[in-house]
Image: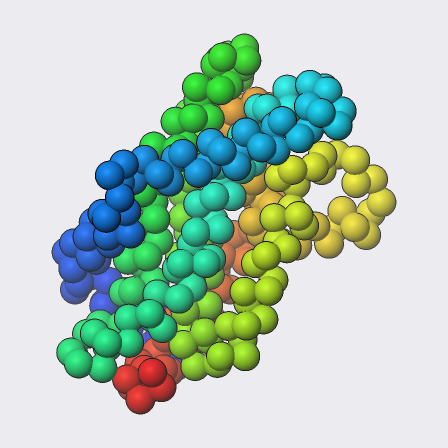
Amino acid sequence: MMFESIRYIGEEHKKNWRLIMKLAYMDSGKQTARSSLGILWIYFRDLLFIGVFVLFRMLISGNDKISGMDSIVYLVTGMIPWFFINDVLVQGGMAIRNSRGIIQSLHFPVVVLPSVSVLSILLKRILSFLLIFVVCILFGYRETIHLGLFLYYMWAMLCLMFSLNLVTTAIISVSDDFRQLYESVLRIMIYTMPILWDFSRVKAVLPNVLLRINPMVYVIKGFRDAFVLGHTQDALYTVYFWGCVLVLFFLGSFFQFRLKKYYGDLM
């Protein structure tokens, strides 16, 4: 059953890749089409959010360093990837549930919707990652920027969010209770990851391990490695991360395969 599920996911994406690209492009502009500034509103909100946290930190503790980095660099290298991850978790998780009309009325390849949502959000947010380059260069980190590591962690982030989205879209589409729980967890998730606070201050072994269990922490820390520290994370943690991605992909493929005949009725 598992191999059949994986083959089903692969075949559907191979057969419908043009549709995925088209829908992602259309969806990337749909949410901001009615505003005069369009997609610029996304970047304005990001800058405003980052600015508030930078100001708050400067008022509380001054412009001190976090993990040896300038506080602004630390916040930007963590928050820009988080904005993408959060959008996928919030918007992408509802991709199938919010498409009930097209699912019920047409013979539509539902399994491509998680990929459409991830790609659509990437198209909307890809330019925001340039802000990390700009900030790091302005604060004197030009020599530590590692383009290869940046591309690696971008790929790692996309693989993780695609696999996770396969799982969440399937469960949310059939369980309103899970949707309520899911939305509650998302509201506090930013505070449980080293985005706004210093990961290196967690010295106790058990809390450190519990934090690292979340594969998103690998991605957040990875972007800081790519722009400031210039090195990869330890091999064991990397193996664990890709193991999580594979497990999520296998589970998501299985759920999508089992639910493909029932999506129309469940909506």
Which residue sits at x=35%, y=38%? 41
Looking at the picture, how far across and down is residue 160, in whole percent?
46, 53
Judge whether residue 28 can be spotted in this image: no
Residue 208 vertical placement versus 131 (above, below): below
Which residue sits at x=19%, y=52%? 26
Determine whether, in the image, residue 22 is placed left or right of residue 137.
left
Which residue sits at x=24%, y=62%? 13
- Residue 40 position by quadrant: top left
Determine whether, in the image, residue 141 is placed left or right of residue 197.
left
Residue 90 vertical placement versus 198 (above, below): below
Looking at the picture, how far across and down is residue 130, in whole percent?
39, 27
- Residue 78 position by quadrant: top right
Determine whether, in the image, residue 267 is placed left or right of residue 190.
left
Looking at the picture, how far across and down is residue 91, in whole percent?
40, 58
The quadrant in which the N terminus is found is bottom left
Nearer to the camera, 224 or 182? 182
The quadrant in which the C terminus is found is bottom left
- Residue 156 position by quadrant: top left
Which residue sits at x=46%, y=37%? 46
User: Is the image coloured rainbow, by chain, by secondary structure, or in one colour?
Assistant: rainbow
Residue 5 vertical placement versus 144 (above, below): below
Residue 265 vertical placement versus 70 (above, below): below
Judge whether residue 71 can be spotted in this image: yes
Looking at the picture, how far across and down is residue 57, in whole percent?
68, 28
